[in-house]
Amino acid sequence: MDLTVAGQHVHAGTGGRAFDPDLPLIVFLHGAGLDHTVWALPARYFAHRDRSVLAVDLPGHGKSQGAPLTSIAALADWVVKLLDEVGAGRAALAGHSQGALIALETTARHGSRVRALALLGAAPKMPVHPDLLASAEANDHKAFDLMTSWGFGPAGHLGGARVPGSWLMGGGERLLERVRPGVLHADLTACNAYQEGMEAAAKVACPAVVIMGAEDKMTPARAGAKLAGAIPKAQQVLIPGCGHMMLAEKPDETLDALRTIL
């Protein structure tokens, strides 16, 4: 589906069904340097079960035009412009990693527009290692190597993917290699600068779930639990044997967790 948001072309996956503005809407928000394709399974699942789905490419990512936005606050306001564009009064938001920060900040700033919140691979703060930031700034492939090495848990490093013959870390690298120069650095800089997670969490009034990977090195489960503890009545779901890339590593378990709230 192609849209115009803030004067720029935006692409969004709709899960294989035509967008229906009369159905409850779910907006899926991807992480740093990625695009809407990471949400393929949950987008398709919910689109075929009486939900409208928008798995968006954030500005400057995937098939969306424009420069990447450089702060989590700006991205949160952009999400509301997206809702306005499709005529949606409210939506459920599901975000992974940087997308989780965007979903959280959107809920804090525009709570009346959010009916449910799912945060995957999330933490109150997401400081980025200086070596990763420097590599991303230089558009060095090392940034992709570091993200896949740190991002994937046992299923990525040791095997065990549900699809025979699939190579999770290789697939993760190929996806990151599609990002435009400068975009990953902008994303990581926005994550690194975000300090308002705990304050935002306290403002969440809608149903929420925080989904954590037990082996996550980038947003450790203890940080996710801290964030969940700051959100009134939030559910916590811990996926065993899973790293940060839970949508690829443990797709069924992640979908089961999303089904509890979306």
Image (cartoon, rainbow, N blue to C red):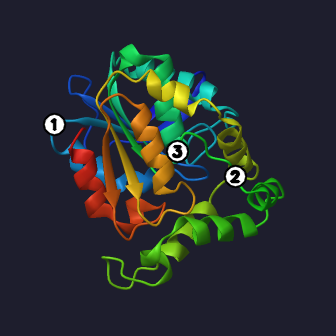
Q: Is residue 97 left or right of residue 73?
A: left
Answer with mark 1 or mark 3, whichever residue precedes in sequence. Answer: 1
Q: Which type of secondary structure does the marked residue at label 3 adopt?
A: loop
How far across and how far down the image is residue 230, in percent?
44, 32
Mark 2 residue type = Val
Q: CA distance from mark 3 to mark 2?
A: 12 Å
Q: Are marks 1 and 3 in contact (CB under 8 Å)?
A: no
**68 is higher (above) or lower (below) than 24:** below
Q: Which residue is mark 1?
A: 50
How far across and how far down the image is residue 143, in percent?
72, 64
Q: Which numbered mark, 2 or 1, is in the foreground of this view?
A: 2
Mark 1 residue type = Asp
Quick one: quadrant of the C terminus? top left
Classify mark 1: residues with Cα within 10 Å, few (<14), some (14-19) or many (20+): few
Q: Which numbered mark, 1 or 3, is in the foreground of this view?
A: 3
Residue 141 visible from this viewpoint: no
**166 is higher (above) or lower (below) than 99:** below
Classify mark 2: residues with Cα within 10 Å, few (<14), some (14-19) or many (20+): some
Q: Which residue is mark 3?
A: 123
Answer with mark 3 or mark 2, whichever residue precedes in sequence. Answer: 3
Q: Is residue 255 left or right of residue 195?
A: left
Mark 3 residue type = Ala
Q: Are marks 3 and 2 in contact (CB under 8 Å)?
A: no
Q: Which residue is mark 2?
A: 128
**175 is higher (above) or lower (below) than 163:** above
